[in-house]
Each structure stands twice: as structure tokens, then as C-alpha cells.
Amino acid sequence: MKETVVSGIRPTGKLHLGNYFGAVSNFIKMQHEYNCYFFIADLHSLTTHPTPSDLHGYVKHVLVEYLACGINPEETTIYVQSDVPEVAELYLYLNMNAYMGELERSTSFKDKVRSQPDNVNAGLLTYPSLMAADILIHKATKVPVGKDQEQHLEMTRTFGNRFNRLYNADYFPEPYAFNYSSNLVKVPGLDGKGKMGKSEGDANCIYLSDSPEIIRKKVSRAVTDAGPTSDNQEKPEAIQNLFELMKIVSLPDTVNHFDELYNRQAIRYGDFKKQLAEDMIIFNTPIRERIEDIAKDTSYLRQVAKHGALKARESAQKTIREVRELIGFKPF
């Protein structure tokens, strides 16, 4: 029997190359080997954006892009979190046995209190309980998370084990952090200072939905320097980042050509950037075209969302039914 993997996707914006070679590529591989539940975390998004201007639009955008990248709704379960009300019910039960002190010690809660002091809501405090409900509702054993979420995953194990002790049942398994590959591609940004990420601004990212014109403009403005001053000198971070991007989207011969030019002090950054932009466009175009096609197919999107909700609810309803019995809820 396949192990169960659960992962949430926040509806916070467009996917970029860093997302694609990170989480998305992992998901695409996982769906063939595990029993996967990938959900769009619209409930979670309300903790920081309680009055979103277009929540449905954000959710649709995420669904479209993940489908365009290769998430197959026939092989995996992709659904919208709010379409599975059993998650909210389990969240309530877990909150009944989550202690104020442990919730307040959450690093992410303390960070949010500092960053949004005017919106310290109960959802922020109980975020770990909702994350635990997302995972435990499907009795998952593997959860793809980054370092910033490992404390929440530890709390998920705490809540599940506490439930098991309180109700004298070996019911919830212990989920653990998991990555399909230990050799994930780290995609640098265009600002010359680190990885590609939305928090650094749109100019730092190449989005999967970017048009050729936008890609050319962004790459042309990427940070460079005055050029090498000696043969075979070490590349500064900004230049090394651009070469790392070229390794991802270009042929090895192309990379070697420009590397050789750099080592001979003969590189022209204008030519280098033009080649990088064209290779990015070649890589991006099939995904962008699928994004545009899927976004137009409202019927297909409705079918995918409905199918995903049915599959997720089948699993969730079984868990809730058994949890209610263990707690002692019984009909008269």
C-alpha cells in the first residue's frame, strides 16, 4: 500500500522558476509513487489576509498553474481546502486539546505578531492546529515542508499523539518531513543577491506565465558588473547566479561557450543576457501556453475541483467518522 503524502499550496501569487524546480518538480515525481493529497490552502490564507480582494481568482490561478506544470488529477488528489469541511471539524477537535502556551511558543506566530501587530488573530495563534488537521485528516506519514515549517510538523505529531493518548487509541500515525530528492535545484534570482522569490519583488523572478517580452526585459535588467579583469577569475555572486540560471535552461554547450568567454575576459554581458532570455523563453513557452489554455477551460477546472473535493472528502469523512466515535459523539 502506498504511503500518503499531504502538502498545502498557498494561493498567494504566480509560480516562478524557483517554485517549478523546487516544490512543483517534487510534486510531479511524488504523484507517481505515493498516495498524494495536494490542497490549495485558502483557509490558511485568511490568517494574514482576512479580506482578500479576489480569493476565488487566486485559488483558480494556483489550480491552473499546477495543472499546467504537470500535476495529474487522475493520479493524485488536488483540491481546495475549503471544499472539505471535515478539515475545519478536525481543526476544532484538535484545538480543544492544544495548549495556549505551546501555541504561543510557535516561532512563526511570534514572527507574525511582530510583522502584523494590528492583526494578531486567533487563526494565527492556532495555525499549527489547522496545519495538523490538514495532515491528520488523511493520516499522512510524509509531508514536504521547508525548514520554516518543521516546528509546525513537530506540533502535528504532538497533537496526534496527544489525541491517541487521551482517547486510548493508536489512531493517528506520526508524519515526518520529506523531500523526494536531496538534490533540489536552487534557482537564483535576477537581483544578484540570492534565490528567486516573490518577496524580493517581481523583477527578481521569471514567472511561468511571463510573456517573451517580459522575460527579455527582466533579464536585460539583471544585475551584472563591469566584467572580469583577469583570466579565470572567480565569478562574483551576481554573475555566478546568471550562469546558474543558464545551466538550468540552456544546453551545456551554450554554458561552456559563455564560461570560456568569461575566463578569457571576452564576455559581452549583452550577448550573454540575450542568449539567457531566449533559452528561458524556449523553456517557459510550453508551460505558459498550457496555463493560457487551461485558464480558458472553465468546465475542465470545475470538473477537476469537484473531482478533487470528492476524493478528498471520501478520505476525510472516514477519518471524522472514526474520530467522532473515539471522542464519544454518538447519535441517539
Image (cartoon, grey):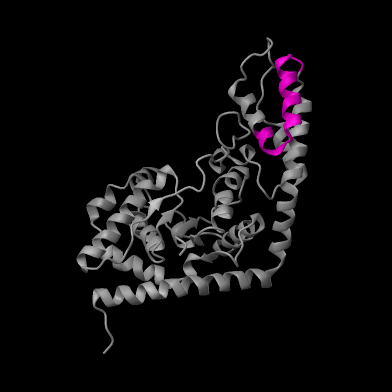
Q: Viewed as shown, does residue 320 lie left or right of 280?
A: left
Residue 70 vertical placement versus 248 (above, below): below
In the picture, residue 32 is in which quadrant?
Answer: bottom right
Q: Viewed as shown, does residue 239 lie left or right of 46?
A: right
- One can see residue 121 in this view: no
Residue found at the very far bottom of the displayed protein: 332
- Residue 51 in the image: state x and y as whole percent: 48, 60
Which residue is painted at 76% across and 30% down in the image? 253
Quarter of the picture containing the N terminus is bottom left
- Residue 323 in the image: state x and y as whole percent: 31, 73
Q: Nearer the viewer, residue 18 or 176?
A: 176
Residue 14 vertical placement versus 318 (above, below): above
Magenta region, residue range: 245-266
How many labels were placed on the picture?
0
**Residue 258 is a magenta residue:** yes
- One can see residue 129 in this view: yes
Residue 48 vertical placement versus 277 (above, below): below
- Residue 245 in the image: state x and y as whole percent: 65, 34
Quarter of the picture containing the C terminus is bottom left
Q: Viewed as shown, does residue 257 lie left or right of 25?
A: right
Which residue is painted at 62% across and 41% down in the image? 202
Q: Main SS of the magenta segment?
A: helix
Q: Nearer the viewer, residue 272 or 135?
A: 135
Residue found at the very far front of the displayed protein: 1
- Residue 115 in the image: state x and y as whole percent: 40, 43
